[in-house]
Amino acid sequence: MSGNEEKSPGDVGSLPAEVGLVIEYSNGVRVYQLDPFLRDMRWPEVRTDSASFKALPQHARLYEQSRAFLDAAIVLCEQAAEAGANLEWPRASVCYYCLHLATELFLKACILRVGGKPAKSHEIADLLKRYAELFPGQENQFPTPWSLSACDLDDAVGCKVLKGVDRVPDQLYRYGMDKDGTGSSGTQFFTPGYFFNYARHLAVKWHEVWSNAAGSVDG
């Protein structure tokens, strides 16, 4: 083994300030690599990892993810509102994206929680139908702007109502355009105060539904 070969650093103790990586060679030489983002770091003692999360059952992981995205939507909504007259659509779109993803994950989590099998789809309307079958009762219901899919609208009207990216909310809020770069043919609206109240309502309702589901299954 030559003197400049890298080996496992082993237990190198606490790293010096602003050092992000230590490389220890077989000849005992250590090379310290600085990381500028460690400088003047806020919340230096706060951290987490995914070990305990990975150990959760699938339905629990999806539920925790749904709550995280819902919380993110609420926080982003508050920040968007603070922009006042300078509020622009991209901020609103991100709020809707987080809310849409949170709703999808929550429905899938609930379906799995009671032994069901959710569709491998991002379509809220389809997941909601399965959810309603497994969670009957008004106490489990909640409003969502995606209760009708593009296909549901087509069937109701008798012709193709939405086209392009407007048929796929997941892509509409994430990219704002389809794969060819064509944007929405409509105009979307965002009122932070209304969005905030709705998202906070979901936070309470979802907690109630999940708690009740856990009690019925575990009991």
Image (cartoon, rainbow, N blue to C red):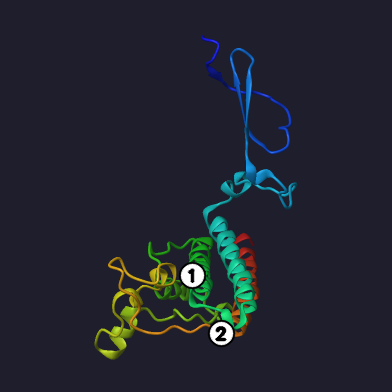
- Residue 40: where, in percent of width, then height? 73, 48
Identify which residue is drawn at 53% across, 61% down: 113
Residue occupying the point 62% across, 84% down: 193
Question: How far is the residue under mark 1 from the one under mark 2?
Answer: 15 Å
Give the labeled residue for mark 1: 97
Task: Specify which label sits upstream in the sequence, 1 or 2.
Answer: 1
Above or below, 21 relative to 180: above
Q: Residue at x 66, y 48 (%)?
A: 48
Query: Foreground residue, 155 or 194?
Result: 194
User: Is 117 situated left or right of 206 in this image?
Assistant: left
Residue 122 in view in this figure: yes
Task: Determine which of the numbered discs, if any, sits on residue 35 in the image.
Answer: none
Q: Residue 20, located in which quarter of the rendered image?
A: top right
Q: Quarter of the image containing the C terminus?
A: bottom right
Residue drawn at 61 percent across, 44 percent down: 51
Q: Nearer the viewer, residue 211 or 99?
A: 99
Quarter of the image where one finds residue 137: bottom right
Mark toward the viewer: 1 or 2: 2
Q: Which residue is mark 2?
A: 191
- Residue 209 visible in the snapshot: no
Where residue 13 appears, x then y in whole percent? 73, 28
Q: Amino acid at mark 1?
A: Tyr
Callout 2: few (<14), some (14-19), or many (20+) C-alpha neighbours within 10 Å? Answer: few
- Mark 2 residue type: Thr
Neighbour class for label 1 at 10 Å: few (<14), some, many (≥20)? Answer: many
Tag 1 secondary structure: helix
| Element type at mark 2 | loop
Residue 1 in percent (x, y) is at 51, 9
Q: In the image shown, does 165 or 152 lie closer to the viewer?
A: 165
Instruction: Looking at this view, name the residue that lies furthest to the bottom.
Output: 157
134 w.r.t. 159: above or below: above
Q: Is residue 36 above or below residue 150?
A: above
